[in-house]
Amino acid sequence: MANTKSAKKAIRVMARKTAVNKTRRSRVRTFLRQLEEAIVAGNYKTATEALRTAQAELMRAAQKGIYHKKTASRKISRLSKRVKALAA
């Protein structure tokens, strides 16, 4: 257990940041799940709308440090490729 005042404060700060990051990660996963459901259903219009919102959430998460920038870009690229295949 932390002994110093600063260490105790660091633990409190870390707990707050962990909670915020957890909600952000959960939010991203929700949008990705909605996109995945639209792709599986084969609904192109719904999938494109879901892709737009998921893309925004992924990039926001990358800015906040939840995901690495290149990881978010890779996910977006792969998802957009799958959505584009629905149109064909």
Image (cartoon, rainbow, N blue to C red):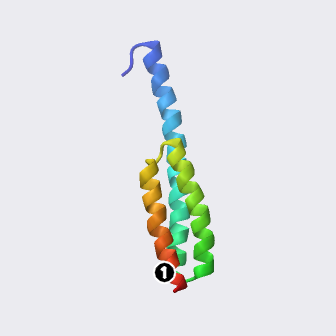
Circle 1 sits on which residue? 85
Of residues 70 and 27, the one nearer the viewer is 70
Who's the residue at 50% across and 70% down the image?
A: 80
Who's the residue at 62% across and 76% down the image?
A: 46
Of residues 80 and 5, the one nearer the viewer is 80
Residue 7 in the image: above or below residue 32: above
Could you say where residue 30 lies in the image, as x and y percent from the top left? 54, 61
Residue 75 in the image: above or below residue 12: below
Residue 24 in the image: above or below residue 79: above
Could you say where residue 69 lies in the image, as x and y percent from the top left? 46, 49
Q: Secondary structure at mark 1?
A: helix
Q: Residue furthest top?
A: 4
Q: Residue furthest left?
A: 1
Q: Quadrant of the N terminus?
A: top left
In the drawing, does residue 4 fall left or right of residue 55?
left
Who's the residue at 56% across and 60% down the image?
A: 55
Callout 1 environment at 10 Å: few (<14), some (14 to 19), or many (20+)?
Answer: few
Who's the residue at 43% across and 60% down the image?
A: 74
Dot 1 amino acid type: Ala
Which image quadrant is residue 75 in?
bottom left
Could you say where residue 87 lies in the image, as x and y percent from the top left? 55, 84
Could you say where residue 10 lies in the image, as x and y percent from the top left? 46, 23
Please give the count of numbered marks on the rendered protein: 1
Residue 42 in the image: above or below residue 71: below
